[in-house]
Amino acid sequence: MKKNAVYLGLVGLLVALDQLTKTLVAGTVDLYRSVPVIPGFFNITHIRNSGAIFGFFSNSESLPVFIGLRAATVLALGFVVFYFIKTPAGATLTRISLALILAGALGNFFDRLFRGYVTDFLDFYLGQRHFPFFNVADSCITVGAALLIIISLRRKPECSPSS
């Protein structure tokens, strides 16, 4: 357990940062209001996402979608925890990437569990083209997943014995 304390601390810190930023935005920016930060590129825009990452299924009122999203989150959390436990202690970057994914998944899961939606507020755009709204938890998941992909692509393939 002691060897995992740093990773658990990272998860706790990132979940706290995610929840703090969402609480600050929800308390200071009216729903659907945008506050320009870098005009023409970045706003803080308070929205509520009842769907999945980047707003997928956000307009669905379907009970199966509601249950499916929560079940998928629980399964993903279980998979990440299992994979983290099975990852060797020396695989630091892999463990960091899994901690990022876990923090993001937990941050958004807590929102869905206690609020019924996720607060998104990071709004990047060029002209009229907006990237989907997201938050700190989504960023953690994306960076963690990208890091895992990079790690897996950089691994040297195992050599098979010559016949």
Image (cartoon, grey):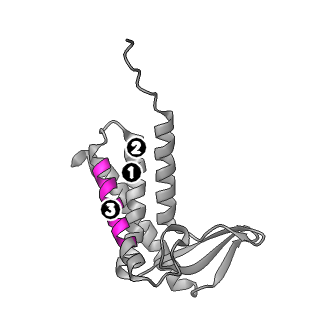
88 vs 149, nearest the viewer: 149
155 vs 135, nearest the viewer: 155
Q: Which residue is mark 1?
A: 98
Residue range highlighted in magenta: 69-83
Specify few, some or many for label 1: CA neighbours under 10 Å numbering under 14, 14-19, or 20 or more: many
Q: Nearer the viewer, mark 3 or mark 2?
A: 3
- Whether residue 16 sits left or right of residue 133 in the image: it is left
> Percent position (x, y) of residue 59?
53, 81
Q: CA distance from mark 1 to mark 2?
A: 6 Å
Q: CA distance from mark 3 to mark 1?
A: 14 Å
Quadrant of the drawing holding the C terminus? top left
- Whether residue 47 sits left or right of residue 90 in the image: it is right
> Percent position (x, y) of residue 101?
42, 56
Q: What's under tag 2, amino acid-wise?
A: Thr
Q: Residue furthest bottom?
A: 30
Q: Which mark is residue 75?
A: 3
Q: Secondary structure at mark 1?
A: helix
Q: Residue at x 76, y 72 (%)?
A: 128
Q: Which residue is mark 2?
A: 94
> Percent position (x, y) of residue 97?
43, 49
Q: Is residue 161 above or below residue 5?
A: above
Residues at discs 1 and 2 in contact (Cβ within 8 Å): yes
> Does residue 14 appear in this view?
no
Specify few, some or many for label 3: CA neighbours under 10 Å numbering under 14, 14-19, or 20 or more: few
Q: What's under tag 1, amino acid-wise?
A: Leu
Q: What's under tag 3, amino acid-wise?
A: Leu
- Whether residue 91 sits left or right of residue 143 in the image: it is left
